[in-house]
Image (tube, coloured by chain):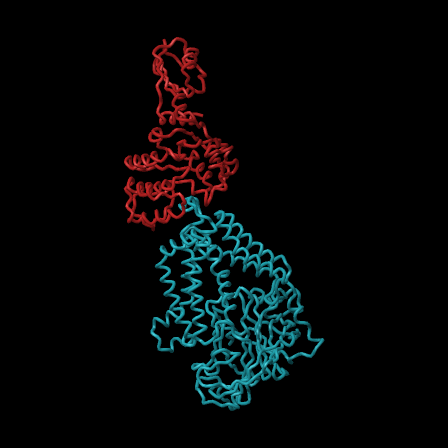
Chain colours: A cyan, B red
Amino acid sequence: MNQILHIFRKDARRHWPEIMISLALLALFTRHELHPWQNSNAFSSFSPFFFILAGRYITPCVILFWAFLIVRVVQGESLVGDRQWWVTKPYEWWNLLAAKLLFIFVFISVPLFQVHLLLLHQFGFPILPNLSTLLVTHLGLYVVMFMPTLLLASLTKNLGQLLLTVGCILLVAVGIAWLATKFPSSDGENLPPIAENFQEFLIWGSLVAIPIWQFARRRRWVSVGALLGMMAVNSLISVVVPNARTVEKDYPPVEAQPSPARIAIRQPAEVTGRRNANPLFDAVPELNLHVPITVSGVAPGTMVMVDVMKITTDSPQDSRWSYRWKYQHVELWPEDQLKSLSYEVARKEYEKVKTKPLNLHIELALSEYQEGDAGILLVPSGRFGDEMLGICRIDPLQSSSIQCIKPFHAPGLMATFDPQEFPCPGHRDSYTIQEDAVSHAWEFSNHYSFPDANYTPIADYSIWFRPVSLLTDLEDKPQQRTKSLILCPGSEIRLARPELKRQLRIQLDLPNVRLQDLVESDWQ
Amino acid sequence: MTPVIRTDALTKKYRRVFALEDVNLEVQEGAVYALVGQNGAGKTTTIKVLMNLIPATQGTAQVLGTDSRKIRGKSYTQIGYVSENQEIPEWMKVGALLDYLRDFYPTWDLGLEQSLVKQFDLPLDRKIKALSRGMKMKLALAGALAFHPRLIVLDEPFGGLDPLVRDQLIEGLLERAAESTVFLSSHDLAEIESFASHVGYLESGKLLFSEDMTSLSTRFREVELTRDSDGPLPSPLPGNWLQPKTSGAIVRFVDSRFDEQTTPAEIQSFFGTVRDVQFRALSLRAIFLAMARKSEEV
């Protein structure tokens, strides 16, 4: 313990200027986080320019500076090479590692933890119920940020080497990602859970084990080999282990049960004439097909989400572009009538078949959510607290939205607002919707599994009411009365927790269509 | 008595190149052992393997009775190591470095530290990066001596230093040599000769000899003799006669196995009747050069 403290004191004495800068940046970060709503409206606020600018870049600055500080401290007793003075002194490796971790703990973790406590306190969120989540968050920060930085610092001699290594790792990552696109995996399908768990174990285990090994033995190339080996094994697992047919398994075909919505494909209008040259459009290697659908029959109090979509075609020789499930996340509310689905395809494959008439088979994987614990929120004026939402207010700049903050995660919610029942004074820039249409908002809980490393315990989110899409939107100038979508004190909002009712798959056909008619671009 | 350092068939290969090949050496307690050899002979490699800074490819080494692969951490409370290539933390001040080191060693002698600081004229308030090379070596040596190490390991400690600093370093070292075993590598043969008790000669990774200085200086002699007539040297000459040269009737060579009893008879058997035979003692430098030239001829 004496040696740990001895090394720690030396590091603290050496790095006090960096520590001071780190604390100053953390103070700026705290100031920024204490005014979450001011941050989002930064340029409209009356903050001095410095604080506005600092606020915009403060989080990446703090993170980068912490990484820099960790690198400096670890490389103070470099673990690379055989000329370092300290390696022939009576340093015990575990004391050295503990001293470095203690430094990170004292000068990064503890101040950040205090800031987190301060933020929770300042926003009126209770500390004790949130303490365990806060500790897990900090543990996550250690695993996700501090240990990888410590690992890289332990494998490099100086900052230049470290930057070069980071560049190489990025190149390898890009290479792996590129290779991954060459294999028939899919956005919507994953590895079997056991393979995924093994991959996670491998990644997080390596991030802990390799620095420990490097401190204990100082064999850089063995450590680098272990790191590369871990990356290779992970990539191999992704390539070799067959993807679970997650979508087919999780979303049974609709035949066995009634569909939660009636969905039909609108035949796209035939495009004639020549396309204007658009270098930007022509340069991208992928393009999006837009499939317009009409929607009806979504039951009141429910919402149907189009999770993923797959397009196949009859012509086997032309179907190489169309075998993958792709994420959609398109909401279908009871009042919705018209939506558009988007499907990314490779330009090379598209160009081969774009003018040929094809029969497209479109599969949609749907999740039906129903309202749970529904209740009415009477929107008060100014800031207000709500058990489900956290602390909220009507967005002063975007009056169709409510800004909220909540500890750690935004809650999952379904919200409905009928502006006709609660008309508010208009605003020229606000959205307009049909007089008889309500609007909805959906918030997906962004809570991921461990390690969930956040730099702030305050989740800042918006409940943004968007107009439903109607068939009349297709008309050039809908001749109907509209009204503004504005929230104001006294507005009533129906709030509910989304409960997943069921998941299923439907198939739709779009016969005799040319792909070029599904591409939105600047046609003459 | 267990040797302080012992290596058995110690080998270090870098790809296909042998930096060390089957090196067997022993350093007894209390010895001042000088490992000499040309650049690239493997002196620093030997020390790095002994100090567990690099792993050996084959063979074993024991330092203070411990397998050299386990030399780390606490082992260094008994070993004072100084190398010309060491990266001392230059951001520190001299005094701060000594303060910092003090807590690592249970046997640190504050009085000795102060006396070394005085003897080496170390400026405690100056940053290390502002020190000259000689000053840095003196500081490193002070840090390596102040805790009464059982073994002092010095890798080329005198390289590039001016004579005054060299003398100061040697003086400081000798004053403490009595209580420690010293193992050093150096090119500076003249200085080593004045205080080394044992010497090992490395050539291309091979240890050509390892013995105490007295026996070394006894067995190496420069021989000069005058033959009755001119003529070519008889061939072959014994392998231990190095660098044979003739100048008219005069013949000179270095005998690396000189023996007062047998060498005159051996000379007579090769040259017949000779006159004015002289046997001159050689300096370590001359022995080193003779060995180096012999290996170049081979």
Whether residue B37 is visible, yes or no, is no
Residue B117: image location, x then y, percent: 30, 42
Residue A449 found in image quarter:
bottom right
Residue at the image position 45 percent from the left and 88 percent from the top = A426
Residue B196 found in image quarter:
top left
Q: Quadrant of the C terminus of chain B?
A: top left
Residue B131: image location, x then y, percent: 30, 45
Residue B208 found in image quarter:
top left
Residue A47: image location, x then y, percent: 35, 75
Residue at the image position 40 percent from the left and 76 percent from the top = A38
Against A173, residue A32 (above or below) is below
Against A403, residue A167 (above or below) is above
Whether residue B262 is visible, yes or no, is yes
Looking at this view, name the residue that lies furthest to the right. Answer: A256
Foreground: A339 or B293?
B293
Against B286, residue B228 (above or below) is above
Number of numbered markers: 0
Foreground: A402 or A480?
A402
Foreground: A289 or A66?
A66
Residue B11: image location, x then y, percent: 50, 35
